[in-house]
Amino acid sequence: MTYALIEQAKDVLRHNDRGTYTVPTDGLYPFQWNWDSCLSALGLSHLDEARAWTEIDTLFAHQWDDGMVPHIIFHTPNDSYFPGADVWRTGRDVPTTGITQPPVAGFCVKRLFDRCQDRDLARARARALVPQIHAWHEWFFRCRDPRGTGLVAILHPWESGRDNSVDWDAALDRVPTEGVEPFVRRDTQHANPAHRPTQKQYEQFMWLVQHFRDLGWDNSKLHDASPFQVVDPGFNAILIRSCSDLADLAQELGETEIAQKSRDFAARGAAALDGLWSAEHGQYVCFDRAVGELVDSPSIGGILAAFTDIPPQNALAIAARINLLAKEAKFMVPSHAPKAAEFDPLRYWRGPVWLIVNYMIADGMERAGQHEIVERIVSDSLRLIELGGFAEYYGPLDGEPCGGDRFTWTAAIVIEFLTRQKALA
């Protein structure tokens, strides 16, 4: 069964391979997405190490001069996705969006390097990527943490990767919809509209895009000009972990200055992350920087914070939190608490299970010594695949597959989980 499932997952990766980058899935997402590519590279490395490095190289070939790595690269024209390059108008030779996504690259490159078979190849490719990843990290703290708090804000829900999370509801209420240019969504033509963000949310998403576009995509202005400024613990944990991993990799490659700066970023971020801990929920929560208040929302973002090194007592509390959720849902880990009023089991990030988040939570909890929880998460993830194939995400109550199918990063994470099981056997 393990061998057959790995081969099926590899077939998905091959199907979505466009030569130097992968698309998440046909139709629904026909371009290169930032954190999709980085996490997919982990799966690709089990097929072809050089191809895995190329996946990340291609992403960073489109890094902006200020250091930002955009969330989508429009390599070839395709009208099956909205909003396309004609809406973003970022002025790049190869069109990109003007916002970013969770910075998993530092973690992924370190993992590719640590387990490589071709050491010379890995050293050469990592040596080229380390300064680029570091420039992205510097951009975050310069442009998304202008007051030097140690934590960065997202300025658009799409940057979080958790587009319609309950975490954003209150902040989105401050985003108007008046003046939004008429548009026709494409996502609802490829997936069940009941599983996707609402029309009002899309109008708010587009208002932010137009607002930033009117500011010329000037990242020195966007933070303070945005009505949406949310400090997401999961997003920041990914950044902190990537800074820490990049520090270790840079040190090994002789990049001592980058190593020290990266350690400093990670240390400041880890200290500041403590301020997002909610004893009431037994997990971290978001902070709405625009109004200066914590967000009372027990979502997956506050559990994903375990991806980085957190205090042992907090890791223990998060393990207890996941065990509590396991009494409310059949499959771990739901993206929102099932007993919360806003929970929607099939609507994107308001309830469904996502394997990439399961992977990062499991990785962090394993580092924290919470092995029982890790086994539950891995087991549930693989059961979802057996029930529903390589879907984009799944219902936590019944395992219903939702969104796109033959999904690249889902397949990549399946390979990661199965090879881990084989290594432990």
Image: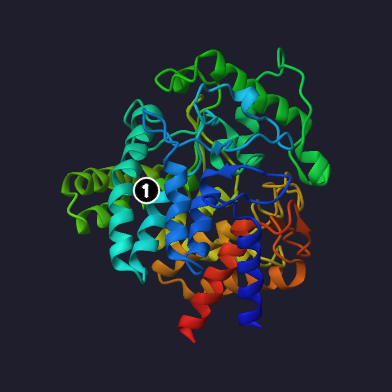
Q: Where is residue 396 drawn, in percent x and y?
A: 72, 61
Residue 174 showing in the rendered view: no
Q: Which residue is drawn at 51% across and 14% down?
A: 215
Amino acid found under the numbered disc labelled 1: Ile
Coloration of the structure image: rainbow
User: Of residues 292 and 238, which is closer to you in this image?
Assistant: 238
Residue underneath mark 1 = 240
Residue 106 showing in the rendered view: yes
Image vertical order of residue 417 relative to residue 170, above or below: below
Spot the residue most to the bottom. Answer: 425
User: Of residues 51 and 386, which is closer to you in this image?
Assistant: 51
User: Of residues 10 and 217, which is closer to you in this image?
Assistant: 10
Question: 200 left or right of 138?
Answer: right
Q: Where is residue 379 drawn, in percent x and y?
A: 62, 74
Pick the quarter of the image with the N terminus.
bottom right
Q: Quadrant of residue 50?
A: bottom left
